[in-house]
Image: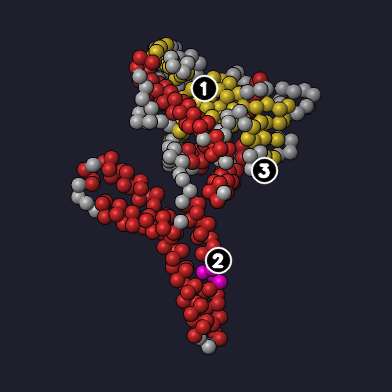
Amino acid sequence: MFDKLEDLVVRLEEILSELQEPDVANDQNRFRKLMKEQNDLTPIVEAYQEYKTCKQNIEDSLQMLEEESDEELRELAKEELNDSKARVEELEHELKILLLPKDPNDEKNVVVEIRAGAGGDEAALFAAEIYRMYLHYAESQHWKVELVECEEIGIGGMKNVTFMIDGKGAYSKMKYESGVHRVQRVPETESGGRIHTSTITVAVMPEAEDVDIQIDEKDIRIDVMRASGNGGQCVNTTDSAVRLTHYPTGIVIYSQTEKSQLQNKEKAFALLRAKLYDLECQKRHDAEAEARKSQIGTGDRSEKIRTYNFPQGRVTDHRIGLTLYKLDKIMNGDIQEIIDACIAADQAAKLANMNE
């Protein structure tokens, strides 16, 4: 581990030196690549330098305890020794986590699809509530949200809703939301007061760039039509809605949230690229089945990940055995504690895998 850390120190010095070269700014691709590498390496190198400082402090304190007879100075040396030893242990753990292989998609924006599952209207109502939960969470992270597609039902529910989140590190946090979310509560339409169980599915996909996924025009059919439902003044008066059909996979994308056909087309293609890229990622995960089992949040979409129990005011994440009794806050977008726990469990599983 320490040989690798020394190599990273040298590499960071090389990057900083390259960034001083006058021609680097003229090559935007090279400049972006170097800046990204610098941002990735800086926290690792800073933690390693602090580690080395603490190790030196331990040596200095031990030497002082051997040579010094003044009790007051010896007490100070003992304090410094204990503090440095404790910090060295913390930094060793931090460095192991910082050196874990990074998910290449972590810094990407995301496309989120929420679909009502078992439970009819109650599932659709819950889908709408989970959509609002993510809107509030995105707002707390200062992320931008754009609606792509939505099929509403008359009582305020959503059969399905697709939206894009644009924000730094969005995938690194939102990826833990993929899976089946289950709700247990008494529906407003239920006169007998019985608790019903309904489900929705959430799919979180990293946004794909043109360089990630190449789409052959021959594989696509583009249809334009009049938008339907709520959507602004131009709805039903112009052919602004766009439907894409991808022949090889059978994926159909429908976008009508914008007034402009061009904007709807851009959104539809962004969603198609994300879905095709997600299929590629799933194939790679299937090929690395063992690695996939050790990760939290990149598992099967059919996996039941969380239960929201309204009568008891609790939320349970089944992957990590976490139960929180603050349902109201969570439904209002306060999901950071769950995400942090998933990240910690994911890191622990990867560390255990590396040590085996």
**Relative height, residue 180 to residue 37 (above, below):** above
**Kind of residue sitting beneath label 1:** Cys
Which residue is identified by label 1?
150
Magenta span: 82-87
Name the residue rendered at 47%, 52% in the picture.
Answer: 98
Please give the residue where the numbered disc 3 appears in the rendered image.
Answer: 321
Estimate how packed mark 3 is, as few (under 14), some (14 to 19) or many (20 or more) residues with alpha carbons within 10 Å: few
Residue 23 x/y as whole percent: 20, 47
The one nearer the camera, 110 or 312, is: 110
Confirm whether residue 260 shows in the render: no
Query: Residue sitting at 52 percent across and 22 percent down?
Result: 150
> Distance of mark 1 from mark 2, alpha carbons?
52 Å
Viewer-closest of 90 and 6:
6
Q: Position of residue 286 (x, y in %)?
A: 52, 31
On the rendered structure, is 34 left or right of 331?
Answer: left
Q: Residues within 10 Å of mark 1 (few under 14, many from 20)?
A: many
Q: Give the residue number, with chain letter if any, for mark 2.
A: 86
Circle 2 SS class: helix
Three-letter residue code for mark 3: Gly
Mark 3 or mark 2: whose residue is earlier in sequence: 2
Sequence order check, earlier mark of 3 and 1: 1
